[in-house]
Amino acid sequence: MTDHPITPPPELVRHWSRFQGETHPEALWFRIANEAAQWGADQELEACCELLQQKGIPAWSLLRLHRRPKPPSLKEQALKTLEEAPGPDYPRAMTVLNADQHALIRRALEALPND
């Protein structure tokens, strides 16, 4: 392995190789490759942001914001699921959810505080 700034350190690669639940070797290799690609991209983004910040260019925070947007919250995901599901807007329609949609909405509701 070359000594390159975005080459993952050996201990991180060893950690990735211990992923639980991957029973097929090919699936494990794909998972490791995806983790390594994301790690390398994150290192490059951080280096770019640091350079822009050192040069006094204020765009560094916008670069990070647009290249690594935050995933939607559980609440946002649940609301989007309900908005996209056919339901009360249609005459005599029932809202039908698949198992993943049901689980998502359940997790969102369970995350709410008990009043």
Image: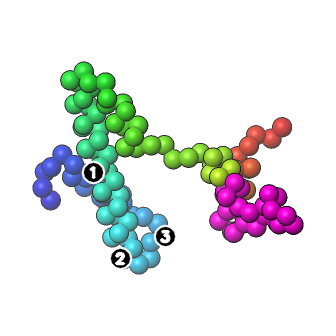
Q: Can the viewer see residue 57 in this picture? A: yes
Marks 1,3: beta carbons within 8 A: no
Label drawn at residue 16: none
Residue under label 1, please give it: 40
- Residue 21, magenta (yes or no): no
- Say which element carries label 3: loop
Sequence order check, earlier mark of 1 and 2: 2
Residue under label 3, please give it: 21
- Mark 1: amino acid: Gly
Marks 1,2: beta carbons within 8 A: no
Tell me the quarter of the image containing the N terminus. bottom left
Q: Is residue 82 above or below residue 95?
A: above
Question: At 45% from the left edge and 43% from the top edge, which residue is drawn?
Answer: 69
Residue under label 2, please give it: 26
Between 114 and 95, the residue placed more toward the observer is: 95
Sequence order check, earlier mark of 2 and 3: 3
- Mark 3: amino acid: Gly
Q: Can the viewer see residue 103 in this picture? A: no
Picture coordinates of residue 32, whole percent (x, y): 34, 64
Question: At 31% from the left edge and 31% from the top edge, which residue is drawn?
Answer: 60
- Mark 2: amino acid: Glu
- Quadrant hosting residue 97: bottom right
- Say which element carries label 1: helix
Magenta stretch: give its range.
81-104
Picture coordinates of residue 75, whole percent (x, y): 66, 46
Sequence order check, earlier mark of 1 and 3: 3
Marks 2,3: beta carbons within 8 A: no
- Say which element carries label 2: helix
